[in-house]
Image (spheres, rainbow, N blue to C red):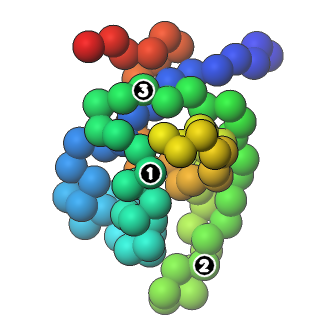
Amino acid sequence: MTNGIFYVTVRDDFKKALQDYFPYIALSYTTIAKNFSKGKSYPVLSVKHTTLIADDEKNIETSQFLVPTEGGNFIWVQAEIFRFVGVEPETS
């Protein structure tokens, strides 16, 4: 198994993705997405498995990414707010 950094970017239409694909994610995660600039690639430094408990008390298996924020901090954030870019950052 090889370990390495890969890159993600915030989804273009996060609110639509939230409604269509990820309804179990709390609305508070949309505010977390504001820590990231749209169209910018972010390195994923670590991944962890997480179990969420949804409003209907179902267990939801998901992942969190450790990524740097625009403010220079590191934050564990739900993988669903991002889309995969590749093993190299996107360039404009």
Q: Residues within 10 Å of mark 3 (few under 14, many from 20)?
A: many
Instruction: Please identify the quarter of the rendering in which residue 43 is found.
Output: top right
Inspect the image, locate mark 1, and give the three-letter code of the amino acid beneath it: Asn
Residue shown at 46% from the left, 60% from the top = 32
Q: Quadrant of the C terminus?
A: top left
What residue sits right under mark 2 in the picture? Answer: 53
Kindly report the distance in space between the C-alpha atoms of the residues bearing marks 2 and 3: 29 Å
Secondary structure of the residue carrying numbered label 3: loop
Instruction: Please identify the quarter of the rendering in which residue 60 is found.
Output: bottom right
Does the residue at mark 2 contact the one at mark 3 (Cβ under 8 Å)?
Answer: no
Inspect the image, locate mark 2, and give the three-letter code of the amino acid beneath it: Ile
Q: Is residue 2 above or below residue 43?
A: above
Kindly report the distance in space between the C-alpha atoms of the residues bearing marks 2 and 1: 24 Å
What residue sits right under mark 1 in the picture? Answer: 35
- Tag shown at residue 65: none
Asked whether, in this view, residue 69 is left or right of residue 39, the answer is right
Q: Residues within 10 Å of mark 1 (few under 14, many from 20)?
A: some
Q: Residues within 10 Å of mark 2 (few under 14, many from 20)?
A: few
The reply to whether residue 11 is visible in this rendering is yes
Q: Quadrant of the N terminus?
A: top right
Residue 83's x, y, as percent?
39, 36
Q: Given this view, does label 3 or label 1 mark the residue nearer the observer? A: 1
Q: Earlier in the sequence, mark 3 or mark 1?
A: 1
Inspect the image, locate mark 3, and give the three-letter code of the amino acid beneath it: Ser
Residue 10's x, y, as percent?
36, 41
What residue sits right under mark 3 in the picture? Answer: 41
Kindly report the distance in space between the C-alpha atoms of the residues bearing marks 3 and 1: 13 Å
Q: Given this view, does label 2 or label 3 mark the residue nearer the observer? A: 3
Q: Is residue 61 above or below residue 58?
A: above
